[in-house]
Image (cartoon, rainbow, N blue to C red):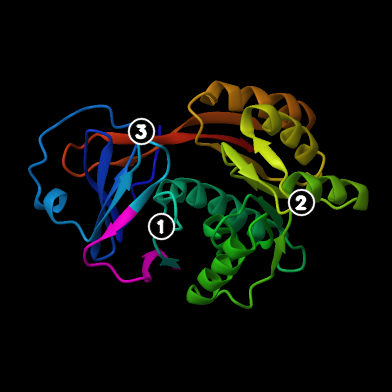
Amino acid sequence: MWIADQWKDYEVIDTSDGEKLERWGSYELVRPDPQVIWNTPRELKGWKKPNARYHRSKKGGGEWEFIDLPKQWSINYKELTFQLKPFSFKHTGLFPEQAVNWDWFSKKIREEKKKRGENKPIKVLNLFAYTGGATLAAAAAGAEVTHVDASKGMVTWARENAKSSGLENAPIRWLVDDCMKFVEREIRRGNHYDGIIMDPPSYGRGPKGEIWKIEEAVYPLVQKSAKLLSNDSIFFLINSYTTGLAPAVLTYMIGLEVEKKFGGHVEASEIGLPVTSTGFVLPCGASGRWEK
């Protein structure tokens, strides 16, 4: 398992009975987590008096109970700064477990940058780019990034994070678009990228109501995205939060579409976050990685 254990401003403090107690900077939140099927004693005071708690409804969805939480605050990961705000369906605008992937591809970008020098850019495509965690990590490492997400609000939020991180003038293209349609257009244009990141949701809708179901749509997207890799490409990353897509499935897809053409190495694993109270690791989905 790949573990995001380099955080200072975030931690999973404890887990019990379908929920996790987390620290986001100075604030403690209680949020649902379907992986937490154990029922252990809730002895820490944060369980009783968090700054906010998300209550899931039996009918689907849910709502926040705000006790003592600002509408917006920020946390840091290394040189990056992220603006957080609680919004619908329990999210805060950041998936901290992804930091283990940011570190991985940032190292790849920096190593390649040294080889190429300043005159040959490293181009990275980030699909389903959300609030820009991976985009900013890649840009901070020296890449030119194309950030694509179907939600205008998420792209606006990502730009706020870029400004907070001192990257407002970094070479980032911000695009509100359906990811599959964008990839198809890029193929027709003959454009290529040295690294591709995709973080598809289990279910979603495009800007014109296009329905996305990961089990049906992810392999065609991997097939088409692989056509955008340059001959000098250095990495390909796909994340999955869907329990039905095991790491071996990600390995198989990337192996068929990327490794067979470019060689290199494919590896996939669960990703997780350490839990302070127990020393165990909370699973948070899986990632598949290809490197040259």
| Label 1: element kind | loop
Residue 70 within the segment the image draws in magenta: yes
Residue 93 within the segment the image draws in magenta: no
Q: Are marks 3 and 2 in contact (CB under 8 Å)?
A: no
**Is residue 140 or residue 41 the one in the foreground?**
41
Numbered label attached to residue 92: 1
Query: In the rendered structure, which disc, 3 or 2, sits on the residue that comes first in sequence?
Result: 3
Q: Is residue 230 visible?
A: no
Where does the C terminus fall, quadrant-wise? Answer: top right
Percent x, y of residue 30:
26, 49
Determine whether, in the image, residue 145 is placed left or right of residue 54: right
**Is residue 247 or residue 185 the one in the foreground?**
185
Q: Is residue 64 above or below residue 268?
A: below
Q: Is residue 151 above or below residue 13?
A: below
Where does the N terminus fall, quadrant-wise? Answer: top left
**Is residue 87 or residue 39 the one in the foreground?**
87
Q: Which residues are magenta?
A: 64-81
Q: CA distance from mark 3 to mark 1?
A: 17 Å
- Residue assigned mark 2: 193
Numbered label attached to residue 34: 3
Numbered label attached to residue 242: none
Query: In the rendered structure, which disc, 3 or 1, sits on the residue that comes first in sequence?
Result: 3
Q: CA distance from mark 2 to mark 1?
A: 30 Å
Q: Is residue 150 above or below residue 202?
A: below
| Label 3: element kind | loop
Amino acid type assigned to the residue bearing label 2 in the image: Tyr
Q: Is residue 8 above or below residue 39?
A: below
Percent x, y of residue 286:
49, 33
**Is residue 178 or residue 199 the one in the foreground?**
178
Q: Are marks 3 and 1 in contact (CB under 8 Å)?
A: no
